[in-house]
Amino acid sequence: MSLDHRLPSELEELRRTVEAFAHDVVAPKIGEFYEQHAFPYEIVHEMGRMGLFGLPFSEEYGGMGGDYLALGIALEELARVDSSVAITLEAGVSLGAMPLYHFGTEEQKRAWLPRMCTGEILGAFGLTEPDGGSDAGGTRTTAVRDGDEWVINGSKCFITNSGTDITGLVTVTAVTGRKDDGRPLISAIIVPSGTPGFTVAAPYSKVGWNASDTRELSFSDVRVPAANLLGDEGRGYAQFLRILDEGRIAIAALATGLAQGCVDESVKYAQQRHAFGRPIGANQAIQFKLADMEMRAHTSRLAWRDAASRLVHGEPFKKEAALAKLYSSESAVTNAREATQIHGGYGFMNEYPVARMWRDSKILEIGEGTSEVQRMLIARELGVTG
């Protein structure tokens, strides 16, 4: 029996809809936002009206009733044109809303998810700390119970969607106690935007993703209700590991979109650009580059869709998510470099999309688990430890 990788009609319709939106709405405007390091509120609001922020959530909470495959398809099509817009959607859904959807109480879900599904507000995921990086288990932020409140102190860094005008909350990990062996009990706590003592720094000056919002956060005696605990006390780290496993599928889809966007732009340029009396695409050296770029994008797509399918069907997917994230992110970096080379000097000019793709690609090998971490996870899933 052969495998059929074609999308069902409803997902193909979604793909076409987002493809048209990316080319007709995002592409003409995003360059200006990118160069000004400005958040594209107008585009994000339109994405909310389209239901993209609610794609994988049930209709009960205002979602579209889809799944991670639907989300990945939307992310891939957006990232073929621009990654800042795509990462805003990815972080808003996978990191902002999904923790509430998986681990929130009914009251928490109904208080936050309907507005997150429509894009009225964005949520952020406060895990990484200045001295932590890949060692997310080394959390130093603390939360101490004081009656019916948590008192939070500490800081987080590199947090996407944390300081926009429509950011509604940040879910943060914090040490809430110690186990008998001295290891920290890490819990997750919802901190609404504007809570006294919760300070959002100015946006980072970044190499790429310049039209997305990324900031450092600090917490100084921040008090929130005890009911803002997300999930079980002491299970925050485990909860976020699950969120990261899923999020790697979304990042893989985004990386695939960037890799494919590099192919799209390079094929077009190779057909239009003439040198020595003929299109540069007539040169075998260019043809081989394009063939290899398409191979990477195509294989990346198969990898993330396989991981998403396993997730949707309730099958183990940790290894496949790591494989997809690792391969697609490294493919995106390679394709961006090759696209820049094909464009020559024009590839170094910010007016060309491949320059933006080149700047945006490297973070894909770092965010939501570095390439080194993915290799560790894959080896562990193969039974190789120590």
Image: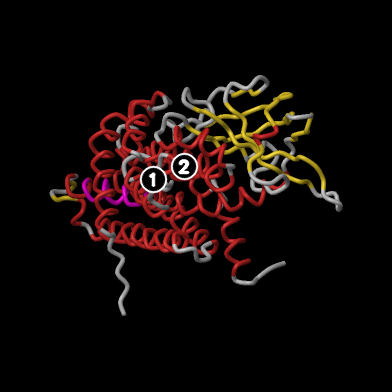
Q: Quadrant of the N terminus?
A: bottom left
- Badge 2 amino acid: Val
Within the image, what quadrant is residue 286 found in? Answer: bottom left
Callout count: 2
Which residue is disc 2 drawn over? 93
Decide: marks 1, 2 in contact (CB < 8 A)? yes
Which of the pair 167/381 is nearer the observer? 167
Residue 63, horizontal then vertical, whole percent: 40, 42
Asked if residue 113 is positioned above or below residue 8 in the image, the reply reads above
Residues under labels 1 and 2: Cα distance? 9 Å
Which residue is disc 1 drawn over? 55
Main secondary structure type of the part rendered in magenta: helix
Kindly identify the residue that appears in the image at 78 percent across and 46 percent down.
Answer: 184
Magenta residues (range): 258-268
- Badge 1 amino acid: Leu
Asked if residue 84 is positioned above or below residue 12 in the image, the reply reads above
Within the image, what quadrant is residue 2 found in? Answer: bottom left
Kindly identify the residue that appears in the image at 28 percent across and 49 percent down.
Answer: 15
Which of the pair 39/46 is nearer the observer? 46
Asked if residue 191 is positioned above or below residue 51 in the image, the reply reads above
Which of the pair 56/345 is nearer the observer? 56
Is residue 196 highlighted in magenta?
Answer: no
Residue 62, horizontal then vertical, whole percent: 41, 39
Q: Secondary structure at mark 1?
A: loop
